[in-house]
Amino acid sequence: MASSSTFADINRAAEFVRKRIRTLPEIAIILGSGSGSLADSVETPTALPYARIPGWPISTVKGHAGRLVVGTLAGKRVAMMQGRVHYYEGYTAERTVFPVRVLQRLGINFLIVTNAAGGINPDFQPGDLMLITDHINLLGLGGANPLRGPNDERLGPRFPDMSRAYDRELQESAWRAAAETGLFLRQGVYAGLAGPSFETPAELRFLRGIGVDAVGMSTVSEVIAARHGGTRVLGISVISNRANLDGSHPADHEEVLRATQTAVPKLGRLLESILRSPA
């Protein structure tokens, strides 16, 4: 797998997509594990398999269909990613954010990232939706930051600020949307780990101790790249399982997918409501 992408690579992929879609997207949505069916709601869609887009990394994980779907949803021009790639698949952190870079070159106004996450907060239940208010990038703190290496100023500054990684106005829009649709919405801090192994009970207790509410194996690198390029971000986690703090219930990817799929209708209603009146 290629380990890096140049500005020319990003432009090449963006031009490929631009020539094959009816209209440029204003909003991009990354659909996490098990929620790819939400792209079925897109009207007048153009679906591009990732394998066709030059340089676009290919997902190898069940629950990630691997298509870019561009069309309209709730009256907005959207680009929906049916699945993402992960660091644990063998890609560098920098390569996992190639799609975000391409979407930025297509001119998106903001990015919505979704994921399936394990609930560490004891109040959380499988099927809950959590608004991400902040994250802890444990993968990046260990050195695997998507901005590592030479910086291309055309993509963003050398040292981007991350104090407001998740846009506060977009969070207010999400709260209003939840109230309007009668959906219960939680909020919390998401921790991004490398995976693919699930966490040990001791690791989960450590995460809870440092203020983590939900944990997963994606998202944070995409958010960093988005903010590096000046794109506003809204993050939503689907709580797919409760943290196994005592080792009594082994974690399982099939369980994650099942729990996520039950929450997909709620996530879809929330996203459409947000799109109707974004900040």
Image: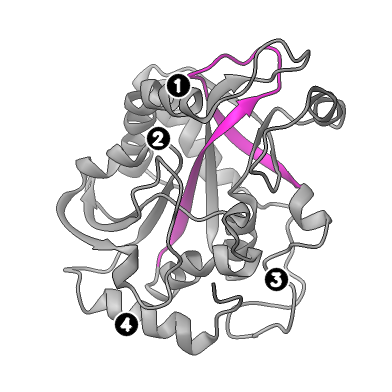
What is the x, y in percent for residue 198?
Answer: 67, 33
Badge 1 marks a residue whose secondary structure is helix
Q: Magenta residues?
A: 108-137
Which residue bears the numbered disc 3?
A: 147
Tell me if 180 is positioned left or right of 32 in this view: left
What is the x, y in percent for residue 259?
Answer: 45, 21
Query: Label 1 to label 4, Cα distance in Å?
Result: 37 Å
Question: Residue 34's mark?
Answer: 2
Residue type at mark 4 is: Glu
Neighbour class for label 2 at 10 Å: few (<14), some, many (≥20)? many
Tell me which label, 2 or 4, sits earlier in the chain: 4
Query: Cβ–Cβ below 8 Å for labels 1 and 4?
Result: no
Question: Residue 15's mark?
Answer: 4
Q: Nearer the viewer, residue 53 or 132?
A: 53
Q: Nearer the viewer, mark 1 or mark 3?
A: 1
Q: Residue at x 52, y 86 (%)?
A: 7
User: Where is the N terminus found, in terms of image quarters?
Assistant: bottom right
Query: Label 1 to label 2, Cα distance in Å?
Result: 9 Å
Tell me which label, 4 or 3, sits earlier in the chain: 4
Neighbour class for label 1 at 10 Å: few (<14), some, many (≥20)? many
